[in-house]
Image (cartoon, grey):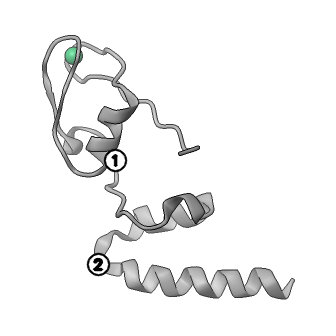
Amino acid sequence: MSEEIILYCIECGARLQEDLITYLREGKMVYCEQCGFENKPSDFNLKIIPKVNASKTPKDLKTLIKATGNRLLKKVKTKINEMREEQKNR
Ligand SMILES: [Zn+2]
């Protein structure tokens, strides 16, 4: 939960609450609390993050997951394990 993303309503510019951002990142549509405008995930430059153990994942790996998306998640997991091995060896 340390990763902070700040998003603003595309209609009125009001800051969206953290839980709304969470919904957006899960691919859900949210309504602005100020103006009631529908903010869609596609309106933002957001990659939808799959629910993996994100809190246990280092930041750069989160970026990797975002960049590759759901389909490549398995490959990413393998990559994560490889990277962890590398870190152990140092
Ligand atoms: Zn708004």
Q: Quadrant of residue 40?
A: top left
| Residue 77, placed above or below residue 59 | below
Q: Quadrant of residue 44?
A: top left
Q: Amino acid at mark 2?
A: Arg
Query: In the image, which disc is placed on residue 46?
Result: 1
The residue closer to the viewer here, 55 or 42, is 55
| Residue 22, placed above or below residue 48 | above
Q: Position of residue 63 (x, y in %)?
A: 51, 60
Residue receiving disc 2 = 71
- Residue at x 74% of width, y 85% of height: 86
Q: Position of residue 71 (x, y in %)?
A: 29, 78
Query: Residue at the right extreme?
Result: 90
Horizontal arrangement in the rendering, residue 38 relative to residue 58 (left or right): left
Callout 1 secondary element:
loop
Query: In the image, which disc is placed on residue 54?
Result: none
Q: Position of residue 59 (x, y in %)?
A: 60, 58
Sequence-earlier tag: 1 or 2? 1
Q: Amino acid at mark 1?
A: Leu
- Residue at x 68% of width, y 81% of height: 84
Q: Position of residue 69 (x, y in %)?
A: 34, 69
Q: Is residue 69 visible?
A: yes
The residue closer to the viewer here, 46 or 23, is 23
Q: Quadrant of residue 7?
A: top left
Q: Is residue 63 visible?
A: no
- Residue at x 13% of width, y 17% of height: 36
